[in-house]
Image: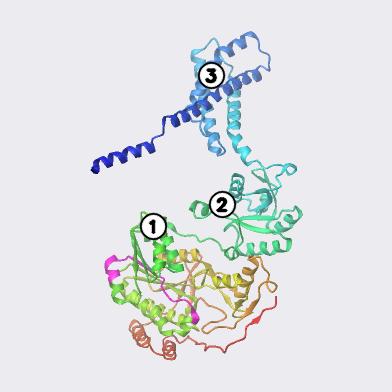
Amino acid sequence: MSPSPRTNSLQINEERRTRVSPSPSFQFAIWNGLLTRCLLLVPVFIGVHCLAYWLRFEGNWDPSIRSTLLITLSWVVVIKLVVFVWFGIHRGWNRFVCFQDLLAICQAASFSSIILALGDYLLLPNASIPRSVFLMDWGITVVSIGGLRSMARVLAEHDQPFFLANPTRTSVFIVGANDSGEALLRTIRRNDHLKYRVVGFITDDQSTLGTRIAGVPVIGMLDQTCQLAEQRQVPEVLISAGELSGKQVRDLVDDGRQANVTLKVLPSYEQLLGGNVDVKPRTVSIEDLLQRDPVQLNLRELHHWLDDQVLLVTGSAGSIGSEICRQLLQFSPKQVVLVDRSENGQFFLERELRTIAPDIDIRVFIADINDVMRMNTIFREVRPNIVFHAAAYKHVPLMEQNAGEAVKNIAVATRLLADLSHQYDVDSFVMISSDKAVNPTSVMGSCKRVAELYVQALAAHSNCRFITVRFGNVLDSAGSVVPIFRQQIARGGPVTVTHPEMKRYFMTIPEASQLVIQAGAMGQGGQILVLDMGEPIRILDLASDMIRLSGLSVGDDIEIEMAGIRPGEKLFEELHTDTEEHLPTSHPKILVANSQHHDLNHTLDAIDALASLANASNAAIISELQNIVPQYRHSAPAPSQVSRPLAA
């Protein structure tokens, strides 16, 4: 006969109590350890009080002084022991002692001294303790208890002098004589797996030269790093991730290559607190070379906009869409709705997001944004307040060959989503556009421009706040050149670059996603907001940097070959058209591309005409795109070119 549910419940609860409640032997061990620490304080207090008397009377103890000492010693020790135990000073004798522990010792010593002074004055008028003894007792107590408490940390973090240094530990410099550098030093000293010995700090602040941080000297400026490392035979230099700009990292890598000094990166404290990285040094990555100043978000404005709202993200399984989802979870949305047709992408993204934010309601839809009935059902069911439209095709050459699919997926799909947002009273619609929409030379770019025109035109006739955010290439995204270069380097080359003078704007995926969200919060209806992309980077330089960061050399180990400009590509990307005016906003990295809006009916007719040709020939589609976007200059496929190596 099987046990009843109640019997099972009782057994489970009993097992749970058995697991949770410590055993008697374990409890005895805990109390025994605490009692031992308390008893260790007794000889310290006796020695401190006797030393205070000895210092006060310079060792000349007559019988009356010895009598007073013997009378008062026992109750002095008892009172101090009770007070110190009350303040918890007997706990935490380990290497994690900090300044707050010293403050607790000072408080306990002060409180016990006050009680002793009052007791001496009120209860023992005939055996009075000299007032100076109280002061010396207080000071010696703080020093002795604080020193004993700190001993474990001193032993754990003490760097040996150079003549006793462990040969297995590598001498290193830390770049950054600041809070980040000091945190990095503590991380190294406390982590036995990091076999480093920090011998100096490098600074970019002249005023910190010659100072010391936790006993380590600040020895030079940033531009002297590799020279000092070479002089002092320091083979490695450490920086915190995100501490230096991309240009500074690039200069250090170049100087280090000449001086045979390796630059390595340790995770920042923000990354460690995020729990996604290990305390392990890594070589410099391409992301470090392109590092820009961190994005400053107006969190109050974003919380006001996003909290308690239903947020829908199209293209959620893509590089930008998935990162937007991650960034949105730091707020308090009512629900986050993921829409993408990639089954695997949605599956793994949902698992990740539920791990990051288990308390946030996340809904996942497998859907094609061109499917009118499916998208209408989703909007009717979830009733989104804010839509982030990130879904789009990205590869320019492929869209040149499949122009009709670009029209469907970019122009027509954006019109559908914008119309649904208007129909279902969505508060804000944020469309992600591309710098390729400016004076386009490709089908993909011209379709993005058509989508921009429609969203702008509809904004004047809708209560929904339609905002377009335009930016350039995103580093390491699915459409980026970086994964291609990595594959080519892993195969041993050659690395193919289309043209030696081709340049592109780059930003990291998190930076782009954060700015998209910020732009969505601050933008006004019908605006095109442009992200500050910094200076464009030559693709040839990017390829060369990636080869060198792989420990190889251009020409000797890996060849770089010129493959010729592909259909739809242009040498330089632009962020605004000739008819647009860039205006500043309240955010330093977001600009407004001010332009005249097009008539809604005219734009609707143009998209209808374009949609009717979606299954026609590429030539017919391109001709219609040029009618809608006069700036579109179609670049015909170039004749096949023989790849030629670039001289090192």
**Residues at badges 1 and 2 in contact (C-beta under 8 Å)?**
no
Residue denoted by label 1: 354
Residue denoted by label 2: 279
Instruction: Identify the amino acid type marked 1.
Output: Arg
Q: Is residue 410 left or right of residue 642?
A: left
Q: In which quadrant of the rendered view does residue 498 lie?
A: bottom right
**Residues at badges 3 and 2 in contact (C-beta under 8 Å)?**
no
Q: Which mark is residue 409?
A: none
Asked if 24 appears above or below 351 in the picture, the reply is above
Instruction: Identify the amino acid type marked 3.
Output: Val
Determine crowd level at label 1: few under 14, some 14-19, many 20+ residues with C-alpha closer than 10 A. Answer: some
Whole-percent x and y of residue 541?
63, 72
The reply to whether residue 577 is visible in this rendering is no
Q: Earlier in the sequence, mark 1 or mark 2?
A: 2
Q: Is residue 395 magenta?
A: yes
Residue denoted by label 3: 76
The CA distance from mark 1 to mark 2 is: 25 Å
- Along the line of sight, the residue nearer the viewer: 358 or 387: 358
The CA distance from mark 3 to mark 2 is: 47 Å
Between tags 3 and 2, which lies in front?
2
Q: Secondary structure at mark 2?
A: loop
**Image quarter (top left, top right, bottom left or bottom right) of the N terminus:** top left
Whole-percent x and y of residue 405?
41, 82
Residue farthest toward the top in the current orientation of the protein: 63
Asked if 125 appears above or below 490 in the picture, the reply is above
Q: Earlier in the sequence, mark 1 or mark 3?
A: 3
Residue at 55% across, 22% down = 42
Asked if 173 appears above or below 38 in the picture, the reply is below
Residue farthest toward the front in the current orientation of the protein: 1
